[in-house]
Structure formats: structure tokens, C-alpha cells
Amino acid sequence: MKMRLLMAPPVLAALYACASTGGGESINIDLQATQRNAGRIAQATLSPVDDKTYITVFVSGVPQGTTRPLRLYTFIYPGTCANPGAKPAYELNDTVVTHRRSRADGWSLYKMVPAPFATLRSGGYSIVLRTSPADGDYDIFCGDIK
């Protein structure tokens, strides 16, 4: 039973990718670590799914002392990382608990944005990952959606 639970997120990602419309295109966005999380890497993959966008995020690490299980909050802001809008266009925080990939790897998140893929790509948006309020509510990664 544990194996099935551990396999569920990757299987869901594959199902979403197969169900996508719009030619099956996906984009990868390198997320840049903020000063609070220097030296870490992250990447987001955005894929079209009907009139929504599926996001898979991989995170290599978080600031020392961040509580486990790891909870990361995800936001889509209008604007860029250098010049974000005043408030998020989309708050993707119904589920904030991450999935541990392996002891040597990092964590994964799976999100669905209630916006078409083309809208996110053409509208000048950025994706932000933030620690939980209990862990300081700090932005730790950001990447411009292009």
C-alpha cells in the first residue's frame, strides 16, 4: 500500500500530461533561490491541461531549520521576480505539503492553476515559492514565466 501512495504524484503528473491539450507543449522554468536560500536550485514545469495549467515543482533544498514535513506555499504573481505585482494573481495553497523524492534528492510539489497555459505564458507572470508562516513566511525561490 505504501508503494501506491508514494507513486501517486508521478502517476498523476503523467496522467495530466497525457490529458493535456494544446499540442502537448510544456515549459521548464529555472527558479532562482533568494538570499534566504542561497545555493539551492529549483525548477517548475508548466503544462497545458484543457483550460488550466498543471505545475510540477522540484526543490533541492530549503533554509536550515525549516520544519518537516516540508510545507511550501506557491503563488503566481503578475510581473517579474524583479518587479512583482502588489498581490498574487493566483494562490495555489489548497495543498502545501511536499513529496520527498528520495533521501538524496529534494522535494516535489504538484499544483493546478485555474488559468490557461497561454495566458500564463503571454501575461508577464512569475512563480514564487514561500516557506510556511511557521517558518517565517519567506520567499525562497522565484522564476519568471516566459
Image (cartoon, grey):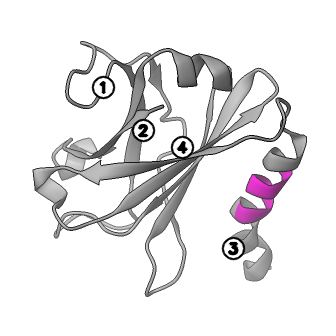
**Residue named by callout 1:** 80
Distance from the alpha carbon under mark 4 to that under mark 3: 16 Å
Residue appearing at x 84%, y 35% in the figure: 23
- Label 1 vs label 2, nearer the camera: 1
Task: Locate residue 108, reporting x and y percent.
Answer: 52, 61
Q: Count neighbours of disc 2 (C-alpha within 10 A) and say few if under 14, some if 14 to 19, many if 20 or more.
A: many
Distance from the alpha carbon under mark 2 to that under mark 3: 22 Å
Task: Locate residue 49, reporting x and y percent.
Answer: 78, 33
> CB under 8 Å between callouts 3 and 1?
no
Q: Main SS type for the magenta part? A: helix
The tag on residue 95 is 4
Circle 1 SS class: loop
**Residue named by callout 2:** 74
Q: Count neighbours of disc 3 (C-alpha within 10 A) and say few if under 14, some if 14 to 19, many if 20 or more.
A: few
- Label 2 vs label 4, nearer the camera: 2
The tag on residue 53 is none
Residues drawn in magenta: 10-15
Q: Earlier in the sequence, mark 1 or mark 2?
A: 2
The tag on residue 6 is 3
Distance from the alpha carbon under mark 1 to that under mark 2: 15 Å
- Label 2 vs label 3, nearer the camera: 2
